[in-house]
Amino acid sequence: MTLAYLYYQIMARKHNKRARKRTHSVDVKEWAQKVESVFRKYPTRKFNYKQLAAQLGFKPPMVKAKVEMALADLERAGKILMVDRGKYKLKYNAVYTEGVVDMASNGNAYVVSPDTESDILVRAANLMHALHGDKVRVSLFARRGGKKLEGEIVEIVERKQTEFVGTVEIGKSYGFLVPSSRKMLVDIYIPKDKLAGVEHGQKAVARITDWPEKASSPFGEIIKVLGNAGEHNTEIHAVLAEFGLPYEFPEEVEAAASTLDTSIKEEEVARRRDFRGVPTFTIDPADAKDFDDALSIQQLKNGNWEIGVHIADVSHYVQPGSILDDEAIERATSVYLVDRVVPMLPEILSNGACSLRPNEDKYTFSAVFEMDEDGKVHKEWFGRTAIHSDRRFAYEEAQQIIEDNHPEGEKADFYKEIRLMNRMAKVLRDKRMGSGALSFDKKEVKFRLDEDNTPLGVYFKVGKEANHLIEEFMLLANRSVAAFIGRKSDGQASGKTFVYRIHDDPDPTKLMDLSNFVRQFGHEVRLGSKKAVSNSLNKMLGEVKNTPEANMIETLTIRTMSKAKYTTQNIGHYGLAFDYYTHFTSPIRRYPDVMVHRLLQHYLEGGKSPHMGPYEELCEHSSEREKAASDAERASIKYMQAVFLEKHVGEHFDGVISGVTEWGVYVELLDNYCEGMIRIRDFRDDYYTFDSKNYCIEGESSGRIFQLGDQMKITVKNVDLERKQIDFEPYYGSES
C-alpha cells in the first residue's frame, strides 16, 4: 500500500464525512419545513411526532427520527413550543383562523373552525356585526390556564344570509323587522320610504342594505310582504322564506317549461330499449301526484326473472345550461311541508311529462336485473328506455295483495308478481341487515287537515312490506349504478368522477353517550367493530319498539349517526352497509339524481372522466339545500303542532321527557308526538337545579329527579303560533 493511496483514502473519508454532514443538514431542514407546514395549517392544535407523521402521510415508526430532529430544530429556532410531554404547538404572537359563526341566545357566539380543537368563544362586543352562519376571520387571544379558546372577529369573509323573515313593527317615521329566527338576535331598522306598504304586525322579508359601524341594528328594506301573522298561508310562506326556499317559479321558468315538446316520438324510442310491452306498475302513496319510479317484471326462458327499475328520464327534458337546469340547481330538492309539496321542477314536468302515470308511454332511465326467485342477481343492464305503466297501486292496495286479503283475491292485478317481488325484497333486506345495515322504522307524524288546512288530528305513518318492497329495489338500483361506475372489474376503485351518497361511521364519543343513556332503560349498545355496533343498535331498536321511550331513543340514535351527504369522494354508506351508493331513483325531486343520470349516460357512451371540481361544488350545494329543506319541513311540523295544541290549552296529557337543559325540560306527548317545554320556574313543588353530568334536574328539598326518558303528566300552558313555541307545566292534580 503506497503513501499516495493512504493519503487518498484519508481525504476521501474527510470528504464523505463533510458530504454526509451537508446531506444531514439539508435533510433536517427539509423535514423541518414539512413539519412547520403542518403547524401553520393548524395553528392552534397540539401535535406529537405520531400525529405529525400521519398528517404528512407516513407511518410513524418509519420517520420517527426525522420528525423528532425537525421538532428539535423548530424548537431551537423559536417557532414551536413544547406545551406537554412530547406535544408541540406553533408559537405565534397573533394567530388567525377562519370559521363559521354559531350564535348563542345570550348574544355571544362560537366560531366553528376546522383548525382548532374546540370552538372559539367570541363575546358580543367582539362580533364586528357578524351574524349566524357567516364565514369569518378570527384573531385568537392568548389562552390563560384552562380557559376556553377565545377571540375576536376581524373580518367577515362571506355573509351567509342578508334576507330575513319576521314581523314588522311600525313607528311614526320608521319600522323594525323583528326576525323569526332565534339565531338572528338583532332587529332590522327599516326607514319609512323602504317599508313597501307593509302594515304593522304583518310578516315580511327584509334585506339588509347597510350596517354602519356604530349602529346597533342593521339598516334594511322590505322586499316581500307575506301577509298577516297567524294566517296559515302566511306562516307556511314565512317558513319557506326563513330557510331561503322559494314557493313559486319565476315566470320565465314556467314559460320555458311550457314550450317543451313532451310528446313521445317513435324515432326517440328506437334509440332506447323498448319495455312498453313488458308488464309494468307503480306503487306510491295514495295522495302522490308525481310517480318517478316504476317496476317491470317478466320471466325469462331460463326460468329466471327480469326485474326492471324504471326512473323518469328528467335529463331528456332538462338540458345542462338551460333556464330549467339553472332553476333545478338552485332549488336542488323538492320540499315536503305538512300541507304541500314545493317541487324542484315545474308542474308540467314533475306531475306531467316526467310522471310515470298509468296508461301513458314515458321515457325512462332504467336499471334492469336478471334475478332468480331467491333474490340473487345474475346479470345487470343500465340505459335509456321507454315504458308503459299498466297499473298504479297505492301502498295500501299492494299491502292487501301481500297479506292476501285483497277483495279480488288471486284475481287482483299483478297478484303473483307483487308477491314474488316481495319475497325477493325480503331476501335483499335480510342480506343487507346481515352485512350490518341499520334498521330505522321510525313512525312518521302526519296531520289530518280540513279544507282550510287546520289540523283535526294526528296519525302515524308506519312503513309495511309494500313500502319495503319498493325501498329494496330502489336501493338495489342505487348501489348497482354506483358500483358499476365506481368499481373496476378487479374490485378496485375506478377513479371516475361520479356523485355518491355517503354516510360516515358514527362518532365513538356519541356512541358511548348513547350507550350510557339507553343502559338506564335496560338496553345495551356494544362498542367494537362496525358489524358488532350495527347489530347491537338493531337489537336495541327492536327492543324499544312500542315502548313509551321508543320515539325518543330512535331520535337520539339517529342524532348519534353522521349526516349522509353528496360528494365525489366515495367512502361508502355506513347506515346501509354499502361500499358504493348513489341516488339514481328520484330525479323529479333531487338534483343529484339528475347529475347521476347524465354521468351514467356519458360513461355508457364511452366518455372520459370529466373534471371533478364542478361536480363537487354541486354536491356541496345540494347537501346544503337538502338540510334547508329538512329544517323547513321540521319547522312546518312545529307550526302545525302549535296550531293543533292551541285548541287544547289547559288540557292534560301524558308525555315523556325528551330533553333536559339548564332552563327547563322538553316533553314529548305520547298521543301525538307534539313537543313542548316546561320552564324550571313552572315546577311549583320545589326549587330545581340542572345536573349537567346526568342530564336531569333535581329538587333541592325533596331530592326528586326528572331525567331523560321519565314519563310525566303535563298541562298545556300556552301556545305562541308566531314563534312556533309550546309551553307546558307539570300537572299536579285537581286544584279545585
Image (spheres, grey):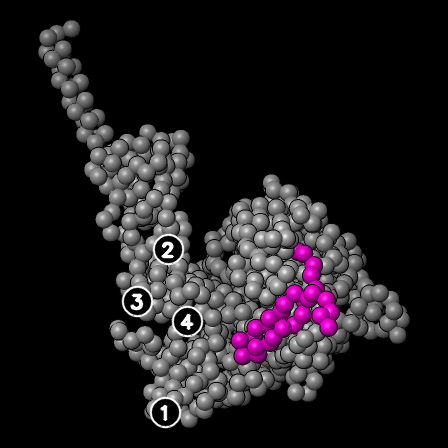
| Mark 4–mark 2 CB contact (< 8 Å) | no
- Distance from disc 2 to disc 3, alpha carbons, whole Å, reads 15 Å
Residue at screen point 32% across, 29% down: 65
Q: Nearer the viewer, mark 2 or mark 1?
A: 1
The amino acid on which the numbered mark 2 sits, given as a three-letter code, is Ile
Residue position for label 2: 120
Q: Is residue 717 magenta?
A: yes
The x, y position of residue 89, in whole percent, is 31, 42
The amino acid on which the numbered mark 3 sits, given as a three-letter code, is Met
Q: Secondary structure at mark 4?
A: loop
The amino acid on which the numbered mark 1 sits, given as a three-letter code, is Lys
Residue position for label 4: 185
Q: Secondary structure at mark 2?
A: strand
Res 172 label = 1
> Which region shows up in magenta?
709-736
Foreground pick, 116 / 198: 198
The x, y position of residue 105, in whole percent, is 44, 65
Residue 200, above or below 68: below
Res 90 label = none
Residue at screen point 61% across, 46% down: 516
Residue 522, above or below 706: above
Q: Nearer the viewer, mark 1 or mark 4?
A: 1
- Distance from disc 4 to disc 3, alpha carbons, whole Å, reads 14 Å
Q: Secondary structure at mark 1?
A: loop
Res 128 label = 3
Label 4: few (<14), some (14–19) or many (≥20) C-alpha neighbours in 10 Å: some
Q: Splitting the image into 4 quarters, where does residue 128 fall?
A: bottom left
- Of pointers 2 and 1, the one earlier in the residue sequence: 2
